Image (cartoon, helix red, strand yellow):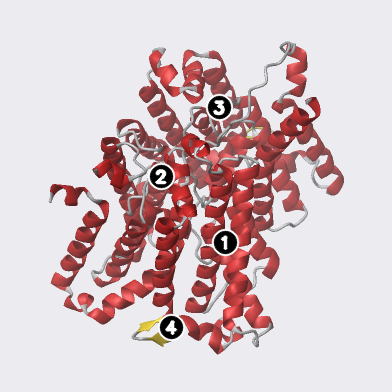
Amino acid sequence: MAKLLKNREVLLVIAIIALVFLIALRFPGFVAPANLARVYNDTSILIILALGQMAVILTRCIDLSMAANLALSGMVAAMINAAFPGVPIPLVILAVVALGAALGSVNGLLVWKLDIPPIVVTLGTLTIYRGLIFLLTNGAWINAHQMSDAFKALPRTPLIGFPVLSWLSVLAIAAVYLLMTRTPVGRAFFAVGGNPHAAVYTGIDVGRTRFLAYCLSGGLAGLAGYLWVSRYAVAYVDIAAGFELDIIAACVIGGISIAGGIGSVGGAVLGCLFLGVIKNALPVINISPFAQLAISGTVIIIAVAVNARTEKRKGRVILKKAEAV
Amino acid sequence: MAGLNLSPRILPDRLQSRSSRALKSWESLLLVVAVLIFAVNSFASPYFLDPWNLSDATFNFTEKALIAFAMALVIIAGEIDLSVASIIALSSTAMGLAVTMGADTPMLVVVGLGTGLLCGAVNGLLITGLGLPSIVVTIGTMSLFRGLSFIILGDQAYTGYPASFAYFGQGYVWWVFSFEFALFVLFAVVYSVLLHKTNFGRAVYAIGNNQTAALFSGVRVGRVKFILFLLTGLMAGIASICLTSRLGSTRPSIALGVELEVVTMVVLGGVSILGGSGTIPGVVLAAFIMGMVTFGFGLLNVPGIVMSIFIGVLLISVIALPILWSRARRRTAH
């Protein structure tokens, strides 16, 4: 039991249930299954992004350019759709995922080939990507009436009871889970972050692994870009501005160590859900939406303090199961 | 988050002489770039070389440079503070709140500086007291401080600052030299002395190069770092007073994204983002370069967001170029 309580995922599940319970005490409507499904759907984009950020953070890097990448990819998706409404939506999605991955690979190449610190690279590309949107559009917006109906409808199309948006995030969770736990690349993400020197001696190319992590986060940001633009039916320079902080917050809350090597897909998803529940509960319990920024800031600080304490006690362990034996 | 350097270390046959080292230094390169930009600007726009225009141009960088001096020390010590722009916002909001309670100008200055110091202390305590990584802590406080401004202000704005308060951002000390520029010069000297001529400055370099070794050599690492974050908060408070006074109003979105420009300025000034090296004169030159470039772009009617692309490219290339340069040299040496 005590061991179970130390587990980050279990703690988060308890925290989320407690949070939902407290809200439900005053507003029973919040726990209605339909509403909970809506909260999950609202958190889907954050989940998709956090999965990519998690891969990057695991390798001891950080990606501050995800939101800018999302905005640029989303804008390009909207522009393709506005200019050629006939292009099938799956093709548009494929194009922006490729574009996002390409933007991510720029980060990855700079980190890999030039050894520039990740925070500097992504701070730089953050402004560059946002600036590129302005250069592409001259500051113009692409509004709902310029997008085709199919483009806007896809994320909300119901499929076996849930919108496609929710299903896409479930798919992303499953895919990244398999990648992390069942493939050499996933293992390499943990190894590189846990101990880069040891990773080199086991034959892992540290730079290349980081590059792959950035490609993954970029591709997921591209996918999220289409979803964001089609869901809110508008694209402009500043969409998702500052959202990179929410993504990092979700990862930190989910127990992913900023020092690399520690974290799990389950933790990242729960971190997102924690933030999602808070965000959706604020208007219900009548707290000004202006308070949200301060709340996520406080939660980040608390989460990182908790992370630091658990890490200190346990040290760096890559193979959790080996430790248990 | 440092990169891996697995290449063998190359020892030079003889050390370079002082003069050749000065010639090849990053600072002299910056000086050449600054002169070039100055020349290009004077050719590109006939309005550039007017003393009053040049004086206006200094407002582009003085407030950011004030923070950059303290940030340079923080980065040299191997830490980072991403919350500076949010400290500006919170401190400006606190001053606005004080105005509505009837505070006069000296009181406003106290409130502005006090808020900055308090925010710096919060960062410092979390980072040194609890031993948390500064990048995550300051990403957190970045949301927290600006979030508090949003809670206090919402979609409102504070105006109605007293007339005498306008001096800090709009006043002139002598002829075309503004009060802000005077502050910039003053703090450039103060921080140069602090970093390059005192024990405290040595300790900052020592911590940045090898924190453990510094600790065993008797440097009080925690205390030095705490003071650095306190100083950064204080400088952000001073910048907030200048900016609020110059704009004459406070919104929660004030100074959004300034932390990026401050970090760019510091890195452009030759401070290693990995800590351990860098100088204040370099940061001063970088401030001039960034100010002149943005001002020159402004005269040519280039929109602000295009300038930010330029700053992003500048940030990456100033770090990438020396790396590529040293690699090319190593290749020819073999």
Q: Which chain carries label 2?
A: A
Kindly identify the residue that appears in the image at 27 percent across and 65 percent down: A287
Query: Which is nearer the N-term, disc 2 or disc 1?
Result: 1
Measured along the vertical axis of the image, is residue A222 above or below residue A217? below
Within 10 Å of disc 4 (Cα), the crowding (few <14, some 14-19, many 20+) is: some
Within 10 Å of disc 1 (Cα), the crowding (few <14, some 14-19, many 20+) is: many
The local secondary structure at tag 3 comes to helix
Q: Which chain carries label 1?
A: A
Residue B21 place in picture, x, y as percent: 73, 17
Lateral position of residue B86 relative to residue B23, left or right: left
Kindly identify the residue that appears in the image at 54 percent across and 87 percent down: A150
Residue A5 place in picture, x, y as percent: 17, 51
Q: Can residue B157 be seen in this view?
A: no
The local secondary structure at tag 1 comes to helix
Q: Which mark is residue A261?
A: 2
Q: Residue A69 carries which label?
A: 1
Residue at mark 4 shares a chain with residue at mark 3: no
Q: Residue A156 carries which label?
A: 4
Of circles 4 and 3, the one toward us is 4
Query: Which is nearer the N-term, disc 1 or disc 4?
Result: 1
Q: Which mark is residue B187?
A: 3
- Cα distance between the residues tagged 2 and 1: 25 Å
Residue A292 place in picture, x, y as percent: 34, 60
Q: Mark 3 lies on which chain?
A: B
Along the viewing direction, whichever of B247 and B99 lies nearer the viewer: B247
Residue at mark 3 shares a chain with residue at mark 2: no
The local secondary structure at tag 4 comes to helix
Q: What residue type is labelled 3?
A: Phe
